[in-house]
Image (cartoon, helix red, strand yellow):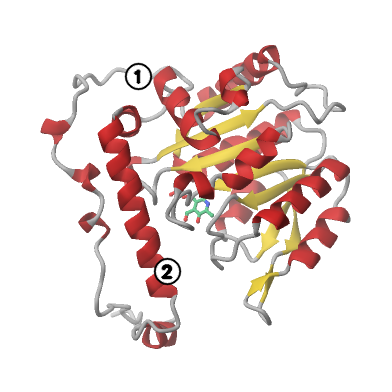
């Protein structure tokens, strides 16, 4: 009836093949209770996710400068972030890259933010337009927000180098831009979670206040579980901002506002998603197994994107 072409592919890969998280319930250690989670999620969830993303040795984690809430995956985290900006950040303009994941537009539009763009991808070089990006960020309205893909930029797969990140951080500092990292693919760019978290950790080490949206949809294969987190690193470098001055006390105030925001949006986050993430991150063997599988996935992505992939031309023709 509908003339929509099927995109059935040869060599179709099943995500279920890799992620052993899907093994049946007997491996689950948690008691099967179905009560509500606390509004920001289980405290253990926030602690484990903070340690994972910012690094166990991160001073910001040790000094308790991270306000974090569990969200409905990455999209929910971006939406909570949009609402946080709308209520508490003086400048309501957000710069997103060209191109970007299309839903960034919808999420931030619905958060009543003004969306502007910065250059990112150069089709001539099939790489990063680093000069264009820096020029646009330098020209951004002072104090506006800039959305950065932490790694494995969607849809281009092109990421800044470490040197580029250092330059981006400098410009963001100079222009007083509030950085909002979207981390939907940590581990999928290089195959190493810590390597992929470089940009986030570098900005934090520099004392930069930042917002962070985390998703476990892709890298843990938890798509429909909707496991994610929104975090604010209460840094030390954005002194002109009233709300965020970089202290534990500041973190507590940010967290209490985040609770008010998420309470009104979802009341309380999904517990099954949280239990799975807690199970993996708190168990050394499972965490190691997960990291190994993430590497397999990253390698596979590289193979699929390789110009030598025999299926690539056929697939491109379908698009
Ligand atoms: C760049 C980016 N951010 C965020 C998301 C949100 O994903 P989810 O809500 O499934 O975690 C996606 C999903 O494709 C994405 O590509």
Is residue 14 rendered to the left or right of residue 312? Answer: left
The residue positioned 35% from the left and 79% from the top of the image is 4
Residue 186 seen in render: yes
Q: Residue furthest top?
A: 249
Quarter-of-image position of residue 9 = bottom left
- Can you give x and y, in whole percent of width and height, for residue 253 in the image? 67, 15
Q: Quadrant of residue 142?
A: top right
Is the residue 5 above or below the residue 93 in the image?
A: below
Which residue is nearer to you in this view: 80 or 167? 167
In percent of width and height, residue 119 lies at 74, 65
On screen, residue 196 versus residue 248, left or right, reads left
Query: Residue at position x 57%, y 24% from top?
Result: 61
Return the residue at label 2: 302
Q: Can you tell which mark lies on residue 36?
A: 1
First in sequence, mark 2 or 1: give its number: 1
Label 1 crowd (10 A; few <14 / some 14-19 / many >=20): few
The residue closer to the viewer here, 252 or 279, is 279
Query: Ligand 1 within 8 A of label 2's CB?
Result: no
Does the image show residue 222? no
Residue 25 location, quadrant: top left
75 to the left or right of 129: left
Q: From the viewer's perspective, is residue 130 above or below residue 295?
A: below
């Amino acid at each position: 009836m509908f003339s929509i072409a099927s995109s059935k592919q040869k060599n179709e890969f099943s995500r279920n093949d890799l992620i052993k998280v899907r093994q049946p319930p007997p491996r689950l250690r948690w008691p099967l209770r179905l009560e509500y989670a606390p509004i920001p999620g289980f405290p253990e969830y926030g602690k484990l996710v903070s340690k994972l993303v910012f690094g166990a040795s991160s001073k910001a984690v040790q000094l308790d400068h991270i306000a974090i809430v569990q969200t409905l995956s990455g999209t929910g985290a971006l939406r909570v972030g949009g609402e946080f900006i709308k209520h508490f950040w003086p400048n309501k303009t957000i710069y997103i890259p060209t191109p970007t994941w299309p839903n960034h537009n919808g999420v931030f539009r619905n958060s009543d933010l003004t969306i502007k763009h910065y250059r990112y991808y150069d089709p001539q070089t099939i790489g990063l337009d680093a000069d264009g990006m820096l020029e646009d960020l330098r020209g951004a309205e002072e104090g506006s927000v800039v959305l950065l893909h932490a790694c494995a930029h969607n849809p281009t797969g092109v990421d800044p180098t470490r040197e580029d990140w250092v330059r981006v951080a400098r410009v963001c500092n100079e222009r007083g831009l509030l950085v909002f990292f979207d981390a939907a693919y940590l581990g999928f760019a290089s195959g190493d979670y810590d390597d992929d978290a470089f940009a986030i950790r570098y900005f934090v080490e520099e004392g930069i206040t930042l917002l962070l949206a985390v998703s476990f949809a892709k890298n843990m294969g938890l798509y429909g579980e909707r496991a994610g987190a929104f975090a604010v690193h209460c840094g030390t470098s954005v002194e002109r901002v009233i709300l965020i001055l970089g202290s534990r006390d500041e973190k507590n105030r940010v967290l209490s506002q985040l609770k008010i925001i998420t309470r009104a949006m979802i009341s309380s986050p999904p517990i099954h998603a949280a239990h799975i993430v807690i199970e993996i991150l708190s168990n050394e063997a499972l965490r190691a197994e997960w990291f190994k599988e993430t590497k397999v996935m990253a390698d596979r992505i590289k193979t699929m994107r390789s110009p030598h992939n025999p299926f690539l031309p056929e697939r491109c023709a379908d698009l």
